[in-house]
C-alpha cells in the first residue's frame, strides 16, 4: 500500500458520502495516515466536513450529482457513511472501476430492509424473526394479524430508528403505519412488520472483512435503544460461549454474502443461547463509538485499515461504555455547558459532534468511559453525559 501527499497530484483520496459524527472520526483516522478526504452531505458544516480537506453539499439521492462529484474528484475509495444515498449509481460507478466500500452490493442490500432480510433469511438461511412486507394499509393490517401483537413496524428505507415503533395494542396499529410513512427515507412507501422477539439483550458484533487476515471480530457490544435510536452502549456484553459462537457464525455468513472489505455492524437479538439476526450496516456503527476507549483500535481505525489492506490487531484495553447527550429543542449554533464536571469523573472523555443545528432528541455528543467492570464504566459514562447541557439561545 502506497500513500501519496494530500492535495497533490499523487494523493490517496477518499470520497466520504455522509458526514455525520461517525464520518468525523473516520476522517480523523484517515488524516493521521496522510489521506486526502472529500466529505459530502446534504447540509453545510456537517461534523466530518469540519475536519476534511474539502467538502460538497448535495442531495446524495440524486444520481447525477453523486456521479458528477465522483468524476470530478476521481477518488481511490468511495466510502458511504449514511443510508440516504442513491445506491444504483454506486453499482454503476463500481462497474466503471471505482472502488466502493465495502462494495456496492453490500451498500445496496443493507440500505433496503427487503433485500437484506430476504438475503439473510431466505438465501443465507439465518434465524430471524417472522416478517411480512406491506405497501398499503390493508395489506399492513393483514400482516399485523398474521404476525400477532406485539409487533415491530419499520419503514423499509430508513436509518437510526426513524419511523420504527412497537405495536402492542389494536388501537396503535394505524398510528404505527402513519408514523412509518412520515419518517421513511424519501416519501414513505413499504414497511416491514416483524415478530417481536422477547430477547434478553441486543448486541452489535463489529465484524471485519479483510483482504489477508480473513474475518475478524471485536468483542460483542451491548446497547440500549430509545425509540429505535442508540442511546447507550458498552463492551464487552457478557454472553454464553455458545451464543457468542452462534453470533460470530451469523455475522460471518451474512458478511460473506455481502462481500467487500471493511467493518460491518451486525445487530442481533440474544435469548439464552439462542441468537437471531436483526440488521447490519456496512460501516462503523453508532453503538461502536465505545471502541474509542475500550479497544486499542477504534472501529474507525479498523475500518480504514481494512479498506487499505493494512494489518489489524484488535485488543480490548478495558471494559468501556458510551452514553449520548441530546438537544431538547430546535435551534442554531448551540453552546455546551458542563464539560468540566463531565471530565472531572475519572477515566472519561467527551466527544461534541459540532452539529450546526439542533432539534428535539437530536444526538449532539457522547460521553465515553472505562472502568474495572462494565457496570462501573456505564455509571461513569452516564454521569458524564448527564453533566452535559446543550443550550440554544
Image (spheres, rainbow, N blue to C red):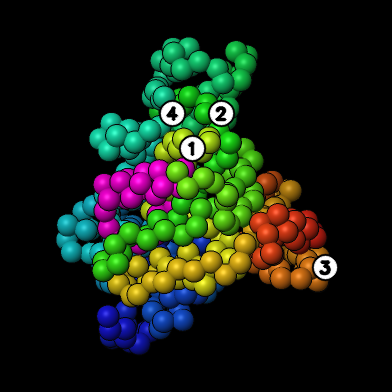
Disc 2 crowd rating (10 Å Cα; few below 14, some 14-19, many 20+) is: few
Q: Residues within 10 Å of mark 1 (few under 14, many from 20)?
A: some
Q: From the viewer's perspective, is the residue at label 3 or at label 1 nearer?
A: 1
Determine the CA span between mark 2 and mark 3.
38 Å
User: Mark 2 or 1 closer to N-term?
Assistant: 2
**Rounded to the nearest whole Å, what is the CA distance between mark 2 and mark 1?**
13 Å
Front tag of 4 and 1 = 1
Tell me: residue 335, above or below residue 153: below
Report the magenta residues as a range.
243-265
Residue 42 visible? The answer is: no
> In the figure, is residue 292 to the left or right of 19?
right
Q: Position of residue 136 (x, y in %)?
A: 41, 19
Q: Which residue is mark 2?
A: 198
Assess whether residue 17 is covered by the magenta stretch.
no
Lower position in the chain sequence, tag 4 or tag 1: 4
Q: Quadrant of the C terminus?
A: bottom right
Q: Which residue is mark 1?
A: 273
Instruction: Quote the CA–CA distance across marks 4 and 3.
Output: 43 Å
CA separation in Å, label 2 and label 4 = 10 Å
Mark number displayed over residue 341? 3
Mark 4 or mark 2, which is nearer the start of the sequence?
4
Amino acid at each position: 500500500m502506497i500513500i501519496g501527499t494530500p492535495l497533490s497530484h499523487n494523493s490517496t483520496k477518499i470520497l466520504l458520502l455522509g458526514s455525520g459524527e461517525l464520518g468525523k472520526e473516520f476522517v480523523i483516522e484517515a488524516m493521521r495516515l496522510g489521506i486526502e478526504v472529500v466529505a459530502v452531505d446534504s447540509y453545510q458544516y456537517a461534523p466530518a466536513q469540519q475536519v476534511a480537506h474539502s467538502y460538497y453539499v448535495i442531495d446524495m439521492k440524486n444520481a447525477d450529482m453523486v456521479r458528477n462529484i465522483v468524476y470530478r474528484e476521481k477518488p481511490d475509495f468511495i466510502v458511504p457513511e449514511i443510508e440516504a444515498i442513491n445506491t444504483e449509481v454506486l453499482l454503476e460507478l463500481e462497474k466503471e472501476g471505482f472502488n466502493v466500500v465495502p462494495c456496492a452490493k453490500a451498500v445496496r442490500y443493507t440500505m433496503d430492509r427487503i433485500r437484506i432480510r430476504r438475503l439473510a433469511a431466505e438465501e443465507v438461511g439465518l434465524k430471524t424473526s417472522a416478517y411480512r412486507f406491506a405497501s398499503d394499509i390493508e395489506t399492513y393490517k393483514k400482516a399485523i394479524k398474521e404476525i400477532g401483537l406485539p409487533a415491530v413496524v419499520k419503514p423499509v428505507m430508513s436509518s437510526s430508528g426513524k419511523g420504527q415503533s412497537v405495536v402492542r395494542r389494536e388501537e396503535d396499529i394505524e398510528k404505527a403505519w402513519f408514523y412509518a410513512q412520515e419518517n421513511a427515507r424519501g416519501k414513505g412507501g413499504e414497511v416491514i412488520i416483524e415478530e417481536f422477539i422477547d430477547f434478553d439483550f441486543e448486541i452489535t458484533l463489529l465484524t471485519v472483512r479483510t483482504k489477508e487476515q480473513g474475518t475478524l471480530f471485536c468483542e460483542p457490544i451491548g446497547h440500549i435503544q430509545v425509540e429505535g435510536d442508540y442511546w447507550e452502549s458498552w463492551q464487552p456484553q457478557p454472553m454464553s460461549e455458545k451464543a457468542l459462537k452462534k453470533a460470530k457464525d451469523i455475522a460471518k455468513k451474512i458478511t460473506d454474502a455481502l462481500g467487500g472489505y471493511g467493518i460491518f455492524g451486525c445487530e442481533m437479538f440474544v435469548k439464552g443461547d439462542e441468537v437471531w439476526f436483526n440488521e447490519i450496516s456496512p460501516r462503523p456503527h453508532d453503538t461502536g463509538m465505545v471502541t474509542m476507549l475500550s479497544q486499542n483500535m477504534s472501529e474507525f481505525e479498523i475500518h480504514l485499515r481494512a479498506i487499505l489492506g493494512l494489518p489489524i490487531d484488535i485488543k480490548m484495553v478495558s471494559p468501556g461504555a458510551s452514553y449520548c447527550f441530546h438537544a431538547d429543542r430546535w435551534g442554531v449554533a448551540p453552546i455546551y455547558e458542563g464539560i468540566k464536571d463531565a471530565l472531572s469523573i475519572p477515566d472519561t472523555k467527551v466527544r461534541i459532534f459540532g452539529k450546526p443545528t439542533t432539534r428535539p432528541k437530536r444526538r449532539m455528543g457522547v460521553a465515553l468511559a472505562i472502568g474495572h467492570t462494565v457496570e462501573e464504566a456505564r455509571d461513569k459514562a452516564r454521569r458524564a453525559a448527564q453533566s452535559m447541557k446543550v443550550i440554544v439561545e
